Amino acid sequence: MSGLVSTPLRLLTLLSFVLVVAGLCVSPGFFNIDEVVYVLGLDGFLRTGGYAVENGYGRFGSNDLTVWFLHPGTDGLASQYPVGTAWLGAAFFPVFGFRSLIAINVLSGVGTLIVTYLLAVKLFASQKVGLLATAFLAIFSFWSEYVFGHWPHAVSVFCTALATLFLFDALPRAQGAFRPAVVSGLALGAGMLFRLDGILLAPGLAIVTILWAARPVSVLAGGAVGMAPMVGLLAATNHAKFATWNPLSYGASGGGTDLASHTGTVAVLLVALAGLVLLRVLPVDGRRLRLGLGLAVVVGGVLVLFSPLAPTVWKLLHGTWAILFDVTAINDPRPGVVRRPDGTLSFWGLPKKALFQSLPWLGLIGYVLVAAPAAVRRGATMVLIISAVWALPFLALSWHGGLGSNMRYLLPLLPGLSALAAWALYDLAGRREDGGGLVRYGILAAVVLTFLVRRMAPEAVWPMQQVYATWIFFAVLALALAVGLVRSQPHAGRVTAVTLLVAGAAMGVALSFGSSDLETSQRVRIANEHRSQSLESIAGPVIFYGAPEHYANAIGQADRLLAIPYPPGSTGTLDPRLLEAACAQGYRVVIRVGTAVEAGLSAERLTALDIAGMTGHDQHYEIGCD
């Protein structure tokens, strides 16, 4: 097994060095509209010290200028996203410029490597498991793709992992539990200043606190004290932006932060928390009451399947299958989600994968469930509870996150799940002298095979990611369960060998997929960076109509505006009042060919622009005035 791991300092330093160097080399281009809005918020803060993003809205008043995620506020348009990226990005800006948000993510990535190692050591008291967990996260997952982007997913992963680490430190303490709990709450709240989904960690941490904390009241109070100032900052900044004290507001109704869309999930969590509190306060001799309560939960769950709530339950089950196991089960009516002839599903041209399709090595967790000793099983149960609670809203809504190659909303689960898989692999490999070698052979075989498929059978690439990967996950899961059940039998050695080989293959597949996802995102960023640079030659004042990520040159330029048909998911119709007003005020309106076709513009209104490198699907036109 020694060949698979190194010293903690050596591995963490090497991986951190790679992240920093790569962060200096990656493209600063935008991947999607979300990243544009984050940077618009940063630009507005740099220029005014406030949160207003003008983008011509005050001049023209068109919703097309909101680029979907800017909302009218107290001083004009403002980014719907929290202010953390604007605040910290402004501090980084003198050194990194518009790479500041990437630099923040890289720094968070380095922190996440360290915290993942410490989290695994805290759970399993093994440096080698900690090293393996770090390797699973950094090398055998899609996490690194988000370290090299503008949107703050890497910050969210770091903050949630840090909050979990300090919570686990507080749980066993009979004395002094309050202080680490405060730090846990502070880390969770700090993450919410960048991404509001950090709030999803709170109920999971509360559940494990109620179940296992030596001083649950002290831990819960400490967490609340730590979160309070961060939530207060969110409320204050939302009031400054949108005149609302709601800390979770995006400045508009609806969307993922609207509690009305999560009423079922909230109800389930409240009932679960009440039941757990009851379990905790029951007297020690109340075993019959505990068993009765457990039986009532089971019976209640069965009865729900025959109640008016049954459709909600089946919807949750379908979402679980689609988001975790098989992405082709997703039903998304938007034009960018297209069923291909081979049965796979294209998400705006990308082969998105369910979580277990991206990371088939997660099947190793089956071994933890059946073979781990009590201390390990307790830590694993905590991680799985936190993961399930975090994922619940996305499963209930079958929400996959839009454009992308993987399930980005489940990124914060990866440090904990990596730790569980690392313990399983380390324990299994330790049962054979050639354990490490078998894993390496599996990794190498899978990497070579996936490379050959890409080169020699490209038509199989999509099924490989969206179909065969599910089979690999189930193969790892079945073998992990089997070897856990027969580990004391005479033939267990052979089953262990096969399990290690297949687990290694699953790791190789994940490495291949993660590398491909990173390459794909960089290709998109480079293409968008090239488009923006090519279109800088267009003289203003000008309105660029279409995907904002193509027009980064407009950011920070008062005479260059961004527009996209409103509302999101609309048929592509341009706002005629904006076109008329633009002509009246001397603004050119430039549009990409695909956007022009979707808008139904007649050829007579379009004048082709002769711009180097902008031909074919990148051809741009100027819309003439009537």
Image (cartoon, grey):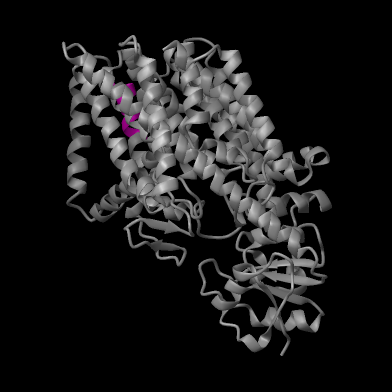
Left or right: 478 in relation to 186: left
User: Which residue is more in the foreground, 370 or 44?
Assistant: 370
Left or right: 470 in relation to 604: left
Image quarter in which the N terminus is found: top left
- What secondary structure prevails in the magenta region? helix
Q: Does the magenta stretch include residue 281?
A: yes
Left or right: 198 in relation to 382: right
Judge whether 194 appears above or below 552 on screen.
Answer: above
Residue 523 pos. (x, y %)? 59, 50
Look at 24% across and 25% down and name the residue there.
481
Look at 30% across and 53% down and name the residue there.
315
Q: Where, by quadrant of the figure, is residue 494 drawn? A: top left
Residue 381 pos. (x, y %)? 35, 25
Left or right: 621 in relation to 381: right
Q: Which residue lies furthest to the front in this view?
A: 456
Give the magenta range.
273-282
Residue 293 visible to the viewer: yes
Look at 48% across and 48% down and name the residue there.
405
Q: Is residue 607 magenta?
A: no
Image quarter in which the C terminus is found: bottom right
Judge whether 29 appears above or below 324 on screen.
Answer: below
